[in-house]
Image (cartoon, rainbow, N blue to C red):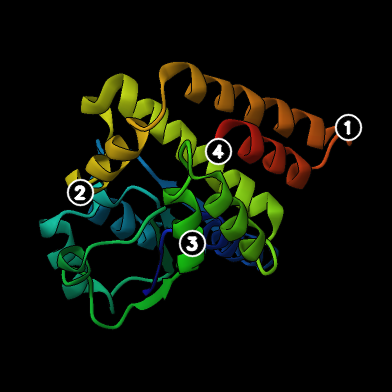
Amino acid sequence: MKIILLHGDNSLKSYERLQTFVDVAKKRGWEVKKIYDNSQKLSEILNAVSLFNKVFLFILDDISLLNKNESVWLKNNINKIDGTLVIYHKDLIPQTYLKLLPVSIKKEEYRLPKLVWSFLESFYPKNGKNVYFIYHELIKNEPIELVFYLLANHVRDLFWVREEIKSVPYPTWRVGKLAKQANKFDKKALDEIIELLAKADIKSKTSQDNLSDALDFIIATKLE
């Protein structure tokens, strides 16, 4: 079995790569099977391949289904199974988990540029000039659609941390950074930014406005 790992904080790029694998598999007439049911062991699903006269592309997008026992089984049986397994994760996978995987797998890591994180982490009130500068440096090389998408998700996380911090499923260090940033906003300001981002998204899809101007407006009016 061929195993490919797609991971990294640039989830758009990694997802595009995943879709490429799916498209190629379908063109070749392969059976595409997503593994998401924790009621059945991964080893049982992969073993069942031998019962069918088909070539399979398996997609595993929940790494919790690949626990230590399943990883040991995979290492011992990787050369005995047909097909391709793509392990997809929307963030960086910790080294401790990577060590559980077979050495022979192909790893593809998709990272966001450091300037993206500088932009997101500097996005708070009374920091408008700095945010504006970083933002315009960023969009020289990155698509505005990507920047907008990442900012919208980041602001959503700030809201989430502020409203229900215990339910946020991120590492402690990341939750702490988000909480510190979220506390720089008053409730009204963060709510207004979320509303403006939602309106900008809708308008951009109906050609009534462009995302760059919308973000300029938000930075100028909400972060000064």
Q: CA distance from mark 3 to mark 1?
A: 44 Å
- Whichever of labels 2 and 1 marks the residue nearer the N terminus, that label is 2
Q: CA distance from mark 2 to mark 4?
A: 21 Å
- At horizontal 27% and vertical 74% (from top left) the residue drawn is 78
Task: Please determine whether, in this image, residue 87 is positioned above or below residue 190.
Answer: below
Q: Nearer the viewer, mark 3 or mark 4?
A: 4
Residue at numbered disc 4: 152
Question: Which mark identifies residue 111?
Answer: none
Q: Amino acid at mark 1?
A: Gln
Residue at numbered disc 2: 173
Task: Please determine whether, in this image, residue 54 is positioned above or below residue 203.
Answer: below
Q: Mark 1 falls on what kind of element?
A: loop
Q: CA distance from mark 3 to mark 4?
A: 36 Å
Question: Which mark identifies residue 56?
Answer: 3
- Whichever of labels 3 and 4 marks the residue nearer the N terminus, that label is 3
Residue at numbered disc 1: 208
Name the side, left or right, on which 113 lies relative to 149.
left
- At horizontal 56% and vertical 26% (from top left) the residue drawn is 194
- Whichever of labels 1 and 4 marks the residue nearer the N terminus, that label is 4
- At horizontal 47% and vertical 50% (from top left) the residue drawn is 120
